[in-house]
Image (spheres, rainbow, N blue to C red):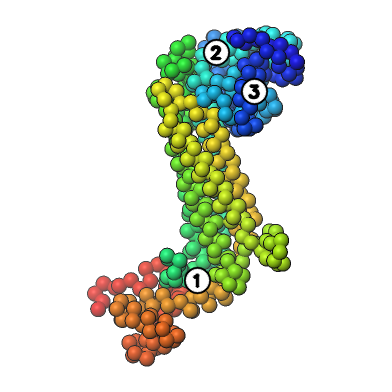
Amino acid sequence: MRLEKDSMGELPVPDDALYGASTQRAVLNFPISGRPMPEGFIRGLGLVKYACARANEELGLLSAEKSRLIQRAAIEIHEGKLMPHFPVDVFQTGSGTSSNMNANEVIANRASQLAGEPLGSKRPVHPNDDVNLGQSSNDVIPTVLHVSVAVALHQRLLPALNHLATALEGKAREFSAIVKIGRTHLMDATPLTLGQEFSGYAMQAAKAAERARRGVAMLAELAIGGTAVGTGINCHPEFAARVCRILNEKTGLDFREAANHFEAQGARDDAVEVAGVLATVAASLTKIANDIRLLGSGPRAGLAELRLPATQPGSSIMPGKVNPVMSEMLVQVCLHAQGLAHTVVMGGRDGHFELNVTLPLMAHCLHEAIHCLANGAIVFADKCVAGLQADAARCRELVDRSLMLVTALNPHIGYDAAASVAKEAFTSGRTLREVVLARKLMDAATLDRVLDPREMTKPNAGAPVAGGG
């Protein structure tokens, strides 16, 4: 152990730790979950500190040598090289001050190493005066929240959802010729093709990706420059704009200084909006996963229109059983994500006055939801959707047995007569064709053309013709 000092006095710190006394106090004060802050958040914290050092150097507030050392240490954090030195629990001070000081101390001590000075010497870089120059935890942590979550949406969730959409689009093309019965209210409806059904799933995934893209834009405004309460005390007036420019250079995104720093620090409505996006994405993926497992139910006593890929044995007692485990995985992921999103909503609601104090928990929830949704979407695409097969014979069997083909008779014999035909067919066990011909409602050739299931899948099938009877 070595002794390090902060404003509250000296404290023993592990010899090999790059953090200092403030971080060690947080470690001792918050032994809650055993979960440190998300890696993406810590990487974002390093990126923000890098941008702040460059901005301060440009403004002539930080020497080139100090800036160089801070930038190098901050980039190492951003690259994930110093993760073991960020032990502070998610459940900490609500402003994230402990995590901000954790970064300040790690950067200062890493600068000391690079300069050949002892750890804890605060030479040549001071954690507060230099690393935290022009900043407060109260504007840094909201900034890191926005930057890190936007990067995670852009780099992780968006590609994953596009990957799933592409896989579903491929199946929509593959299944385009297979006619199946539609279902509404879990009951038989008019036919469609399996490809048309999958095109709906593909569009859901594509819209989910678009929502993730919009989520990035929701986080574009940054709190940096507001310092303690939004007034910008001890901060150069050009600092925030320069930090945003540098962050944009590094990320390729479009961050900008908040239009109102009091809103940017006192409220977390942007994060709440993104939580809504994640909850919506989870709802979409749940629908897709549930439909696919229902369509694959059986193999002999269910719908069995799809054959799901077998990825592992399904039962420890029933030999040969195969379960829709990938759908089940994705549904659980989505339930988890929606719970996390609701926590963010509650955290945003409970902010008070000039600072929301649920920032670390929001960061954990948003990063965890993005991480799980992205991984879940990729695994589901690769291990379920890619291996799906259609049972064309089963699809045809269910179409032929359905009474809802009667819908196509409406323009020819009217709704009431068609309903009567359907009821008689159901109670008597005869086919629709047999009942219609027995009642002499239509001739056989016209009836066969109208009852062709493939014709019913075409756009505007059976639409009335202008001037017709």
Tag count in the figure?
3
Q: Is residue 390 visible?
A: no
Q: Of the residues shown, which amino acid type is indicated by label 1?
A: Lys
Identified by mark 2, the residue type is Leu
Locate residue 227, reporting x and y percent. Answer: 47, 17
The quadrant of the image that shows the N terminus is top right
The residue tagged 2 is 133
Residue name at image x 49 percent, y 59 percent? 199
Q: Can the viewer see residue 276?
A: yes
Query: Mark 1 vs mark 3: which is more N-terminal?
Result: 3
Secondary-structure class at tag 2: loop
Image coordinates of residue 394 in percent, x first then y, are 56, 74
Q: CA distance from mark 1 to mark 3?
A: 60 Å
Secondary structure state at the residue bearing disc 1: strand
**Dot 3, crowdedness within 10 Å: few (<14), some or many (≥20)?**
some
Q: Nearer the viewer, mark 3 or mark 2?
A: 3
Q: Secondary structure at mark 3?
A: helix
Give me the disc on residue 27.
3
Q: From what the image shows, is residue 108 above or below residue 288?
A: above
Answer whether labels 2 and 1 touch (C-beta < 8 Å): no
Q: CA distance from mark 3 to mark 2?
A: 24 Å
Q: Is residue 239 left or right of residue 47?
A: left
Q: Earlier in the sequence, mark 2 or mark 1?
A: 2
Badge 1 is on which residue? 180
- In the rendered structure, which amino acid carries the disc numbered 3? Val
**Residue 406 coordinates in the image, percent (x, y):** 38, 78
Quadrant of res 110: top right
N-term mark: 3 or 2: 3
Describe residue 336's horizontal placement relative to residue 408 as left or right: right
Residue 365 location (% of width, % of height) = 54, 36
